Amino acid sequence: MIHEIAYIEIAPEHAAAFEAAVAEAAPYFRAAQGCRSFRLERIIEQPSHYRLVVGWDRVEDHMVTFRNSDGFQRWRELAGPYFATPPRVEHVETVVDVF
């Protein structure tokens, strides 16, 4: 499994609405081919910064299948209006997992 990590910055006054939009979008990720987990994390030191962490079977499940789906379009409609800057996305794989 790989993880997509999207670094998202929003205007602080939109935090509650953004978090609600992410929760509303969760079913689109749950239904996506190869999607295994979905969580939103807020950066404590910078409360207007978030990390969306999504577990996928393969990068292609995210970058090809999901990105070309109606679910992705709905995700962007829900959360996109709150983005202060375009999200920065990277994919990671675990290479050492000790405990």
Image (cartoon, helix red, strand yellow):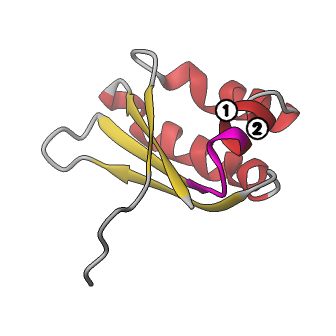
Q: Is residue 91 left or right of residue 25?
A: left
Q: Quadrant of the N terminus?
A: bottom right
* Mark 2 vs mark 1: in front: 1
Residue 39 x/y as whole percent: 50, 58
Say what amino acid the circle numbered 2 marks.
Phe
Count neighbours of disc 1 (C-alpha within 10 A) and say few if under 14, some if 14 to 19, many if 20 or more: few
Looking at the image, which residue is at 62% across and 42% down? 59
* Residue designated by label 2: 66
Q: Is residue 55 left or right of residue 6?
A: right
Give the camera-side residue of 2 and 71.
2
Whether residue 97 is situated above or below residue 95 in the rendered picture: below
Looking at the image, which residue is at 31% across and 30% down? 12
* Disc 2 to disc 1: CB gap under 8 Å: yes
| CA distance for labels 2 and 1 | 6 Å
Asked whether residue 59 is drawn in magenta, I would say yes
The region drawn magenta spans 55-60
Q: Secondary structure at mark 1?
A: helix
Count neighbours of disc 2 (C-alpha within 10 A) and say few if under 14, some if 14 to 19, many if 20 or more: many
Say what amino acid the circle numbered 1 marks.
Met
Q: Residue furthest left?
A: 45
Q: Residue furthest bottom?
A: 99
Q: Secondary structure at mark 2?
A: helix
Residue 91 x/y as whole percent: 47, 41
Looking at the image, which residue is at 27% across and 84% down? 99
Whether residue 95 is situated above or below residue 88 in the rendered picture: below
Asked whether residue 68 is drawn in magenta, I would say no
State which quadrant residue 48 falls in.
top left
* Residue designated by label 1: 63
